[in-house]
Image (cartoon, rainbow, N blue to C red):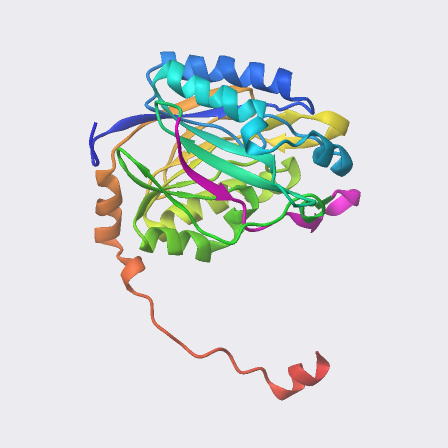
Amino acid sequence: MSAGSTFKVALVQNCAEREMEPSLAEVERLVRGAAKDGADLIMLTEMVEMLEPDAGLVLRKALPEERDPGLARLRGLARETGKWLMAGSLLIREPGSDKVVNRAYMLDPKGEIVSRYDKIHLFDVDLKRGESYRESETVRGGDRAVLAPTPWGLMGLSICYDLRFAYLYRALAQAGASFLTVPAAFTYTTGKAHWHILVRARAIETGCFVFAPCQTGVHAEGRRTYGHSLIVDPWGEVLADGGEEVGFVTAVIDPAKVEEARRMIPALKHDRSFEGPDVPARAAAAA
């Protein structure tokens, strides 16, 4: 397999529980199914091994990387299946910190960790009807963009709420990414309103394929995620949509489509510097 050759990607769509063991058992079944279906690259969701709504319990349950059972089992799955595997994200306790990191891992077919990425933008929002989230209570945000090398080209890593920050994806694409990953646990409320639009927009803006596996269903204490894991091509066309059921979706990816889209609309080469807007005196006084 070489850069530029076609490959089959699978996005696993699970419904994580608040305990690791049942979540991992479901994910293992789905990964094996995707591998049997011929996927070369299998991608998992954000917080794939545990979706714990209680901030205090998150901090008690999270473990250091070397002791995390999910990472060990996923590395074993990569070896067992002989596939590239992206562990969408795990909540990892780091020594000396009172918080966890929300970390994505790219694993090669030998189960080796090729790249790590810590989620930069944290989900602190207040939605309608009292739906509120404060990810920063438990998670320490990352500060570094990451490109993961794969046999098919460079893959820009991101996680969930990062999706709303277009500058991150532009930076990844201009640094050489042909593919972008967005493992997520998008809420049903925000997913229904924004998920498809944002994922397609990131593909169109960058001329990249976007792989966005998203959790689905009702979790502990009634938290609901949107599903609709998406594979989107560089022109913004949806190649696969996971709907709202647990399972996986696949598509055959032709990396040549990246250059084709960028040749037609070379927006990544058209940046221009500009001065910031002047704030009118009346608006400044009001502020």
Quarter residue 227 falls in: top right
Whether residue 203 is visible to the viewer of this picture, yes or no, is yes
Vertical comparison of 136 with 238: above or below = below
Q: Is 150 in front, or is 239?
A: 150
Tell me what residue is drawn at x 75 percent, y 28 percent: 222
Instruction: Say whether residue 14 is visible.
Output: no
Which residue is depicted at the point 53% across and 39% down?
103
Is residue 46 depicted above or below 74 in this figure? below
* Between 168 and 151, the one nearer to me in the picture: 151
Viewer-nearest residue: 198 or 65: 65
**Rendered residue at 32%/23% (across/down):** 40
Q: How many marks?
A: 0
Q: What is the span of residues highlighted in magenta in the rendered image? A: 112-132
Residue drawn where x is 56% and y is 20% of the image: 245
Q: Say which quarter of the image contains residue 99.
A: top right
Q: Position of residue 177 (x, y in %)?
A: 32, 46
Is residue 221 on the magenta stretch? no
Quadrant the C terminus occupies:
bottom right
Residue 36 position, x and y percent, is: 37, 11
The N terminus lies in quadrant: top left
- Residue 275 coordinates in the image, percent (x, y): 44, 79
77 sits to left or right of 22: left
Depth check: give the residue in front, 157 or 38: 157
Q: In the rendered view, tell whether residue 24 sits above or below residue 128.
A: above
Residue 113 lies in the magenta-colored region: yes
**Farthest right residue?**
130
**Left or right: 104 as drawn, with respect to 128:** left
Residue 128 image point, x, y percent? 74, 46
Residue most extreme to the front: 96
